[in-house]
Amino acid sequence: MMNVKETALQAINSYPEYAKEALENVYRGKVFIVFQPYRNTIEKIAKTKRGAEGYIKKQQAFTYYDEYTNELVTCGSGLTVLEIDPTQIENPQTSKTLWYRFMKEYHGQTWYYDNIVKMAKQMNVSVDVMEYILQSVEDMKNNRGLTVLEEAEQPTTQQEMSQPKEAQHEQQQADVKATYTLNEQLNGIEITFTDIPSEEIRNELKAQGFRWSKYKKVWYAKQSEERLQFAKMLVGETEQQTEEVAEQSEAQQEPMQVKEVEQKTINNDNSTQEKEQGQKTFTVIPEVQENTFDLQFFSGSINTDDILNLFDTINLTQEKTLISDEDREHINKYEDSYKTTLSVFENTLQQLQEIHKQYGDYYSAGKAFGFVCDMKDIREMEERTKELKENFIYRICRYFMNKYNVTIDYKTIYNKYDTTVTAQNILDEIVEQLDGFTFAEKAQQEIKQQLKEITKNTEVKDNKLILSNFFYIDSFDLKWGSYKLSYNSYGRAQTLLKALYLYEYNITQLTEEAEQLLKTLKYSKNDDVFTTHELNLNKIKSIKLYKNGRVDIEFTSSHYAREFAKDFLNIVKAA
């Protein structure tokens, strides 16, 4: 592992502008940098140590609330001054390895490729370096990737030199342990890891039909003998241990409750016949309702294998119960527009490529007769086609995020599909991200989780819930004698109000009264904010803000205070 100075030096030698500025600030064979180890960022490059320390002193005059540590800190917190040997800094005008690291960092971010070339020209790099950059950028644009520069991948620290990266990686992966559980209720296998498994193992999991559950943090799949053996192999258990796990899982399951029904059978001629006294035979017919199985029992003989086969043949299309007809109609309009526009773009791109191939490039003066430029016309159309796909996916995801107040990771969907992506593909991915929940359940879950993350010091007294250090004062307004909530506190206020109104009305959207209160907290100052705000709801009476960051939520009864603390903050005991 690199020390702080080695990390800072690597940051300089991976960014041309840092290296250029550092070399320009060399004074008496030294250069000083202000480094933030927490984020591994360079904040300032100075000629002298006094100049670097002066920068930190100025930053310490400004304070803000750090939501990660829940403390009031200065902008200069954690900054350190490092002396760098100029001979260890690579010259961006002559160093290919520096530009290789820089391009490696931006590989895949196609919008930035032209900026790399522009930056190199502004720095007047050598002919060799410029040719290398132009060729590398061209390779990346054509999806051939960035050719590895061996000298840039050499180990830089003593520890790395003594231990190859492969050995380090193998050691890390060796520490990752796996366990599995047989979920008999869902007829599934669930695999849990102590850390993120290697890409090799993840690919094997996917090949075996396992899928990742973000909610339960497990890899899951339907039980089969092949998958059970695979799980056994990952865990490294003996066959006897595997049987013990299965027996333990079976013991935890409650027996199925079967209700007797009127004993009748249906003959071939559709007439009914009473069953003889004492005969009890049942047929299990699973009926899908919402996201659950409703087991209805009717007369007739059937064995265990038949029951399992019935479950196997059910096509549980969860999407149909989650996506309304109104939603589907809205999404179909997006898809029609996308397909029409994509067709025009692809035809235009094909025509431009054919013209360019026939007549040559516009900038090939004297050598061709073309008016089409590869860089400006063809590349831009290719980028526009990619943007079209991203916009199509994002607008569908945004529709559901805005309507149901849930979070959807549209980037994951974007990276998974090319321009042939369909609305059905996107809907399938959205349903998978819901992880078995409805939109409403997912929204409620997210509100509760957000409140838990920002609430640390909590106390229940009678019918009051006390949140200490929940809000913070804007330091800029405080200098002028005004008390106003900080910018970060606005999001906290929104989360708190959403939780309160979810508890009161079981809704995930704020009412007009709540929106008005939120605006008051965001834009007002002094006594308009730090006072008691009457809500006068059935369960919640008021909330009161203090200038020390404390918030008191007064409920209409102590029962409601304890219930909210338990359901939304996992607090069981009152003070």
Image (cartoon, rainbow, N blue to C red):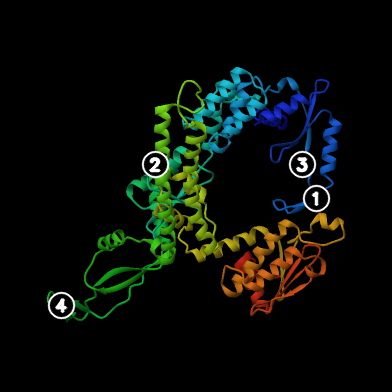
Q: Residues within 10 Å of mark 4 (few under 14, many from 20)?
A: few
Residue 270's label in the rendered image is 4
Locate residue 470 relative to residue 482 in the image: left or right.
left
Between 511 and 249, the one lying in front of the other is: 511
- Label pair 3/1, CB-CB below 8 angstroms: no
- Please say if 528 is above or below 475: below
- Label pair 4/1, CB-CB below 8 angstroms: no
Mark nearer the viewer, 2 or 4: 2
Mark nearer the viewer, 3 or 1: 1
Q: Secondary structure at mark 4?
A: loop
Name the residue type under label 3.
Answer: Gly
Residue wearing tag 2: 347
Q: Secondary structure at mark 2?
A: helix
Mark-to-mark CA distance, 3 and 1: 13 Å
Q: Position of residue 183 (x, y in %)?
A: 41, 57
Mark 2 or mark 4, which has the lower sequence index?
A: 4
Q: Position of residue 262 (x, y in %)?
A: 26, 81
Mark-to-mark CA distance, 2 and 3: 55 Å
Between 228 and 205, the one lying in front of the other is: 205
Mark 4 or mark 1, which has the lower sequence index?
A: 1
Residue wearing tag 3: 78
